[in-house]
Image (cartoon, rainbow, N blue to C red):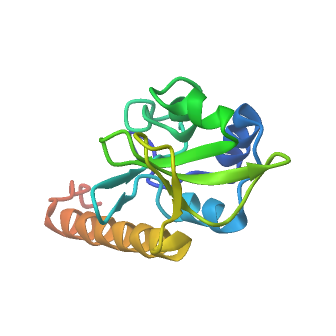
Amino acid sequence: MPGGTTVATAALIDEAERELCVVFPVELRAVWLTHKGTELPGGWRFFPVFDPGNPRKTAGSVTYENLRGAWGMHLRSLDLVALASNGTGNHLVMRVVDGVAIRDILHWNHETEKLTRWKPGIDAVMRSARTSAERLAAIRATLMKDTPRARLPAR
């Protein structure tokens, strides 16, 4: 598809892990393999995995946000990896222990620096990724159906 795909590849996720020196849980990898740009209830934007084939659509990637974003280096110093932002400075994060991201998603408040469990959890992120992927597939199917196809000359 022109402009890249809507899912990350295992190789792109592996590259993000190398850049961040973090091993992501299989459930998180599954989210990115389902749909890389997921919006979550509450105004949360789940960071995609950077795709060099589509840099404009993945500019606010998980690697960028954690290595060069406004809060990324601070969160990293707290042994956290940022997964999503809602535009207020607050983030959804995972705790990192010995280079491994722990499956539980936490809400980090930028004013108090307190962590609380984000109740919807990783399963809600996966549901949102699946919904996004299904909606996109339906839109593409409609566009393909409504787009006139070039006719080949008869032989």
Residue lying at the far top in this picture: please name it: 68
Q: In terms of image quadrants, where is residue 81?
A: top right
The quadrant in which the C terminus is found is bottom left
The location of residue 43, given as percent across then percent down, is 27, 56
Taking depth in this image into account, of 65 and 54 the one nearest to the observer is 65
The x, y position of residue 152, in whole percent, is 26, 56
Residue at 51% x, 51% y: name it: 114
Q: Is residue 96 left or right of residue 114?
A: right
Which residue lies at the image location 56% right of the left edge and 62% below the top edge?
A: 105
In the image, is 146 to the left or to the right of 47?
A: left
Give the tally of numbered discs. Answer: 0
The x, y position of residue 107, in whole percent, is 48, 57
Look at 43% across and 67% down and name the residue there. 129
Looking at this view, name the residue that lies furthest to the right.
98
Residue at 66%, 47% in the rendered image: 13
Looking at the image, the residue that sits furthest to the front is 112
Q: Position of residue 4 (x, y in %)?
A: 45, 43
Residue 55 quadrant? top left
Left or right? Give the position of 115 relative to 84.
right
Q: As displayed, is residue 16 above or below residue 143?
A: above
Q: Is residue 52 visible?
A: no
- Please tell me which residue lies in front, 61 or 74: 74
Residue 4 in sight in this render: yes
Q: Vertical placement of 130 versus 109: above or below? A: below
